[in-house]
Structure formats: C-alpha cells, structure tokens
Amino acid sequence: MTVFGLLNINKPQGPTSHDLVARVRRGTHVKKVGHAGTLDPMATGVLVLCLGPATRLSEYIMGSPKTYRARVFFGVETDTYDAEGQVTARHDTPVTRETVEAALDGFRGEIDQVPPMYSAIRQDGKRLYDLARAGQQVERPPRRVTIHHLAPVEWALPVVTLEVVCSPGTYIRSLAYDLGRAVVAGAHLAGLERTASGRFTVTDAVTWDDLRAAMDAGTWQAVLLPPDLALAGAPAVHLDADAAQRVRQGGMIPADEAAAGPGEQARAYDPDGRFFAVLARRGAYWKPHKVFNV
C-alpha cells in the first residue's frame, strides 16, 4: 500500500531538518520523504514532513504564513545573527522597553529584508553560507516580506520574547539583527520556536521521541495525517466515477458539475471519498493540476 500523508513533528533542538527527513525515511521505509519548510538546527517546533506522493504538496504548506516565538538578545551581535555564531560586536547602549516597542513599529507590515550571509540562498550559483564559511561577504539584495503580527510577549531584558506571524521566506534571524540595529544596541536571535505553519500547530505535533518510538514499534502510521490537510483552505470537489476518470486522464470538468465555491484551486475526491487530485480553475472549468496515483 502506498503511503500518502503528512507528519507534523515538534522538531527538537540540534538536528537539521534534513537530518530528520533522513531518519524518518529510514524509520518508515518510505523512500520519498521531504520537509515543507526548513528550520535551523537551533530552532524547535513545527516541521511538517510529506511522505510518498504527498511530497508534491509541500509547496502549499510552505506558502502558508508562519508563526514563531523568538527570543531576541540585545547588546551582542554574531556573524550568523543567532546564538550559534561567533560574537562580532558587543554594545553598552542601554535597552529599555520603550525603545524596543518604538522600534517594533518599523517592522510591521511589508518590509525589505536582507537575508543573512549564513543562509541557503543561492547567489551567482553559490550558497551564501558556503561563501560565508570561506570568509567572503557579498552584497545581498533585499527581499520583500510581510510581518503580519509582531508583539512582545515576555520581557527579561536584555532578552525580549516576540511573537511573530510572517510570510514564508522571512528570516527571523535577520529580524533580530535589524531590530538590534534599530535600537542602536545590536542583537541576535537567542532562541526560536515555530508554533505554527499554516494550520499545523505545535500543540498538535508529535514529539520526536514519540515518533521515534512509534517507528521502532511499527505503529508510526497512527500519527500520519491526511494529505489533503495541505490544502485545507481550498474548496472540495466531490466527483462521480465518470468525472473522476476524466480528471485522472487529464481532462477538464465543468465547474458547475461539482460545485466547490470560490477559489483558484480545489481538492478533488473520488466516489469513495479519497483525495486524489488538485484542480486549478480555468474559467468555467476545473483543470487537473496534480493527480495522485493512489
């Protein structure tokens, strides 16, 4: 039987996202496993893994807003912008609640953000972190990101814990660094937890220890989530046998043949209620965008 589903893991501190992908691949004996949005080794929290054909759904999870709890340490800057880097500067500038709250206003909404040198972004065909490890610094063009929500939730100066809801592609390390520069005291990211990725939350996530035990016992599929949760916000199209066969063969179906409500994409289900395709609206029709042979 083909494994077709998602795992919402509460990533522990230490391993990389790719480390956990490799361990899940070995523990489940599923060849195709991928993550839907990486986390730095230092970071914890929601890491969604896609198994089997569900790897083709990762883009929908990666494209959703992300929620973080970020611990920002003022007064010290590092080369990686986080606690794992080498200290590059220390500042004696006093930091107050008032100066931090005033600076936060400049980071809400759409902002231009320069990614850190220690990041996986490619520039001129090379990863920035490879250049950084070779001692090179290059100009990085800013990228437009959106900070939907930014608020302090805990004060223990020189550390402030922030809740951040942001667009995909936002670097919280850069946010911490830029916030430190804004209060003229410097800062780095001392801790990070991703509490939500779209609809996937840390409270619903399986711990790594529990998942590892379930893989050892052969019971891990009990925590496997349905693949259609990747598009939980898209309308559902329930098809009869003839319409489902047309979709499987790449044909379009009239949008009124299975009313789904507004939306540019939809989830398609066969007569047995199984999710088997992502549809894209083309005028008055639904066109197959991704079809899963499961």
Image (cartoon, rainbow, N blue to C red):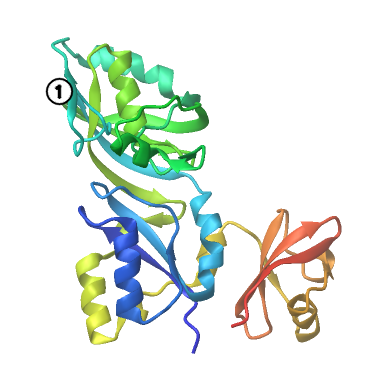
- Residue type, mark 1 in image: Pro
Residue 98's spot in the image, x, y percent? 25, 12
Image height check: is 230 above or below 93? below
As rendered, which of 101 and 188 lies closer to the eye? 188
Q: Quadrant of the C terminus?
A: bottom right
Instruction: Tell whether 224 sits left or right of 285.
Output: left
Which class describes the residues within 10 Å of circle 1: few (<14), some (14-19), or many (20+)? some
As rendered, which of 15 and 44 lies closer to the eye? 15
Image height check: is 282 above or below 250? above
Residue 198's spot in the image, x, y percent? 46, 51
Work out whether residue 26 can be spotted.
yes
Residue at 30% in and 64% down = 20
Residue at 42% in and 22% down = 107
Residue 181's spot in the image, x, y percent? 30, 16
The residue wearing badge 1 is 158
Residue at 69% in and 58% down = 265
As rendered, which of 233 and 22 lies closer to the eye? 22
